[in-house]
């Protein structure tokens, strides 16, 4: 794992000192609230419905045990004993006091972490495949590239006041777990015909009120050209992106309004000018960073105990069926810890749970943890023989829910419970759906299904790419939930289609139940997932499930 | 009146050449550029003795890119950022190629010299310098 060098360390310390000064100047009046706002946003501090919210970056989702324990300490010392893992591999604290924030940032700096550029109109925390370095389908660990991008984008003098926020995601695997096609820049590590490493560069994806699937700007960019090329894209966007209307300011709109070809020409010209200013130091640094991400020393030992435990304990077997993914090293597994216990707030973990996960990672997981954009925590490297012990420790911490990828593994944004922009609640809807399907005991039979919920049109809950998306709106003061179907956030990214009129808060859970139980009758067999069935059959039969004829008669 | 900020702090404006709009060039005047200047036109300004780029709001970061473009095009004259630039943006301005910042007296009163001098160490802690070498 990457460890801060002296330069990184001095940088974040200096940045904390600057922010301490900015907070003091806000309090003594030399900064107006309008002037302070972009400065606090550059340091991850939002103003929410009830209080400030501090968003801490977990760069490319990677943490070690010491860092996880520090997150727990911060939650206890300056917040209410819990934190919220988000869809952008961040952790948010919902209740800090302004005067405490510099101390919280100093505590983060103690473990090589920060909250820099987790908000504001700048390049945000770079995200990566949460199975990076472990996945069986990976050609290269994307985290070294993500770290290089972190260093390049951090405090980039040209790009702190862009037209709008700017998000970059990287994947090195064939299966796209980083939603690269829904980012301002998506990078897929690929090889060209000669076997040389490089990137497919995707630009202009995004969700929000105008969802768009990213387009390929360059199908092969040599690895060494990455920083100047990204700089060219952001430089072109900084001048061309609209500043007259914040809803049209993201690069997806710039690309849409100007056309991909024009953007391509401008970016290639700018790239030609910028390329010579990079003289190779970035590649030398990258080589050092790459060594920091060398795989751990995987153990070679027998997995017999694992098979025996599976046979002996059905609860353990069920957990291994849902919460494990294929690892590249023989005898190893990737463990997803569900932060989606039925009825709890998706993504919320208590400080005790954070400490338990840190202990498990240290003891059984080569000291590595990951935060996934699906708001779960990953132990990327666990030997199969340790799985029974890991499961027992997770159970003791109330973290052994066996629902990864299932109907109750819901992504939900904070919605009306915290967010000032919300038009409806999202957390309680997620809780009710999870509780309902748990009661029906159908979850495992239903199989893979992604439900994603946003509390307003900004789409923080990624509802557009949910197999079932739920968007909470406000219709004349009453919550109204719109359903979209068929969304997909992987390499076959698709924006879901609206099914029809929305449902009230009381009707949304029964509607989801009709939809999902109805799918069980529609599928060809247990192997056809909800998404596959939708793709085969189209909207019509699902619409019939959602809006049965008698209801329509009632409404008429 | 306005205040000119450099690495040594506040000073009065010593530029006596005046300013004109973009169209005319190749004379002793300084050139005033708005933040929405078309980047394709910057190449014509190589010989200007002074270019002043407007920052209509501290949230409008286009001036930083324009300054970078000018410097990459080989512009070596004096480059000034003018308008709503904050002390906290001083390092960004310097790193983007500006020599100095011009602010109003009112802004200078609210953000006194010591807040700007605190960022005169803009050459330190600079990721860009490390990556480019
Ligand atoms: C609670 C305070 C929050 C506020 C005020 C907020 C605000 C916004 C706004 C205004 C947008 C739309 C930006 C645009 O399209 O230009 C947005 C997008 C987004 N937010 Fe949030 N958000 C909040 C919390 C969160 C949380 C907790 C998450 C993660 C769970 C999140 C993840 C996202 C994502 C992924 C997008 C991107 C959608 C896209 O690609 O356009 N946000 N947010
Ligand atoms: S989708 Fe809307 S309600 Fe949900 S967090 Fe984003 S801005 Fe807030």
Image (cartoon, rainbow, N blue to C red):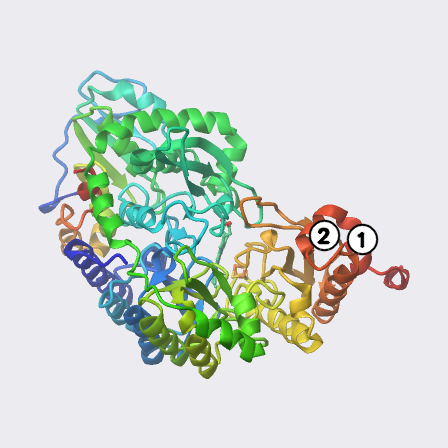
Residue tagged 1? A541
Q: Whole-percent x and y of residue A181?
A: 51, 44
Decide which of A184, A301 is in the foreground and name it: A301
Q: Mark 2 or mark 1, which is nearer to you?
A: 2
Could you tell me which secondary element the residue under label 1 belongs to? Answer: helix
The chain containing the residue under callout 2 comes to A
Total labels: the figure holds 2
Q: Residue A145 placed where, x, y %?
A: 32, 46
Pointer 1 local density, CA inside 10 Å: few below 14, some 14–19, many at least 20: some
Identify the image quadrant of residue A158. top left
Position of residue A271 measured from the top left corner of the image (x, y, whole percent) = 33, 29
In the depicted structure, whether residue A78 falls above or below residue A146? below
Placement of the C terminus of chain A among the 4 image quadrants? bottom right
**Quick one: quadrant of the N terminus of chain A?**
bottom left
Determine the chain carrying the residue at label 1.
A
Query: For residue A280, which quarter of the picture?
Result: top left
Ligand 2 closer than 8 Å to label 1 CB: no
Residue at the far top: name it. Answer: B26
Taking the spot 17% from the left edge, 24% from the top edge, the residue there is B49
Is there any visible trace of residue A234 in the rendered image?
yes
* Residue carrying label 2: A533
Is A498 left or right of B105, judged from the image as shown?
right
The residue located at (75%, 62%) in the rendering is A520
């Amino acid at each position: 794992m990457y460890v801060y060098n002296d330069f990184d360390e001095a940088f974040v310390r200096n940045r904390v000192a600057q922010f301490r000064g900015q907070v003091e100047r806000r309090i003594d009046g030399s900064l107006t609230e309008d002037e302070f706002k972009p400065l606090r946003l550059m340091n991850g501090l939002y103003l929410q419905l009830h209080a400030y919210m501090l968003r801490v970056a977990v760069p490319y989702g990677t943490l070690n045990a010491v860092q996880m324990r520090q997150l727990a300490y911060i939650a206890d010392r300056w917040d209410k004993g819990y934190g919220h893992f988000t869809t952008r591999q961040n952790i948010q604290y919902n209740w800090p006091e302004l005067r405490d924030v510099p101390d919280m940032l100093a505590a983060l700096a103690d473990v090589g972490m920060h909250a820099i550029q987790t908000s504001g109109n700048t390049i945000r925390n770079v995200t990566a495949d949460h199975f990076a370095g472990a996945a069986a389908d990976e050609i290269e660990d994307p985290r070294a590239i993500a770290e290089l991008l972190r260093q390049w984008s951090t405090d980039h003098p040209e790009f702190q006041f862009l037209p709008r926020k700017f998000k970059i995601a990287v994947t090195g695997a064939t299966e796209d777990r980083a939603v690269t096609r829904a980012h301002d820049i998506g990078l897929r590590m690929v090889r060209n015909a000669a076997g040389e490493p490089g990137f497919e560069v995707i630009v202009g994806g995004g969700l929000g009120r105008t969802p768009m699937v990213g387009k390929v700007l360059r199908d092969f960019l040599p690895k060494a050209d990455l920083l100047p090329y990204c700089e060219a894209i952001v430089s072109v966007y900084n001048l061309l992106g609209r500043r007259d209307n914040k809803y049209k300011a993201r690069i997806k709109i710039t690309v849409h309004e100007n056309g991909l070809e024009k953007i391509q020409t401008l970016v290639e010209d700018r790239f030609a000018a910028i390329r010579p200013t990079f003289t190779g130091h970035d590649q030398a640094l990258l080589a050092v960073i790459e060594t920091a991400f060398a795989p751990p020393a995987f153990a070679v030992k027998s997995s017999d105990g694992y098979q025996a435990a599976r046979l002996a304990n059905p609860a353990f077997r069920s957990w291994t069926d849902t919460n494990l993914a294929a690892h590249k090293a023989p005898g190893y597994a990737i463990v997803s810890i569900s932060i989606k216990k039925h009825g709890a707030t998706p993504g919320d973990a208590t400080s005790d749970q954070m400490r338990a996960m840190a202990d498990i990672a240290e003891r059984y997981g080569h000291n590595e943890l990951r935060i996934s954009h699906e708001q779960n925590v990953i132990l990327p490297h666990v030997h199969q023989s340790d799985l029974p012990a890991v499961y027992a420790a997770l159970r003791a911490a109330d973290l052994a829910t066996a629902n990864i990828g299932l109907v109750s593994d819901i992504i939900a944004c904070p919605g009306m419970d915290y967010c000032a922009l919300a038009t409806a609640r999202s957390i309680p809807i997620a809780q009710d759906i999870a509780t309902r399907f748990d009661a029906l005991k159908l979850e495992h039979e239903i199989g893979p299904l992604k439900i994603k919920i946003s509390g307003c049109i900004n789409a923080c809950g990624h509802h557009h790419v949910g197999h079932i998306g739920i968007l909470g709106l406000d219709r004349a003061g009453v919550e109204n939930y719109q359903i979209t179907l068929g969304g997909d956030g992987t390499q076959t990214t698709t924006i879901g289609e609206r099914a029809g009129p929305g449902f009230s808060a009381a009707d949304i859970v029964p509607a989801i139940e009709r939809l999902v139980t109805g799918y069980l009758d529609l599928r060809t067999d247990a192997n056809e997932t909800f998404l596959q069935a939708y793709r085969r059959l189209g909207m019509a039969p699902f619409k019939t499930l959602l809006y049965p004829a008698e209801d329509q008669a009632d409404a008429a | 009146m306005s205040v000119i900020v450099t690495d040594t702090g506040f000073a009065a404006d010593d530029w006596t050449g005046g300013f004109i709009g973009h169209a005319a060039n190749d004379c002793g005047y300084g050139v005033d550029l708005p933040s929405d200047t078309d980047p394709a036109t910057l190449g014509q300004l190589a010989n200007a003795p002074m270019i002043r780029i407007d920052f209509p709001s501290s949230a409008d970061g286009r001036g930083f890119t324009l300054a970078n473009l000018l410097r990459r095009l080989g512009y070596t004259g004096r480059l000034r950022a003018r308008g709503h630039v904050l002390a906290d943006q001083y390092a960004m301005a310097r790193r983007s190629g500006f020599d100095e910042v011009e602010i109003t007296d009112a802004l200078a009163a609210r953000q006194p010299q010591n807040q700007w001098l605190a960022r005169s160490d803009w050459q330190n802690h600079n990721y860009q310098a490390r990556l480019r070498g």
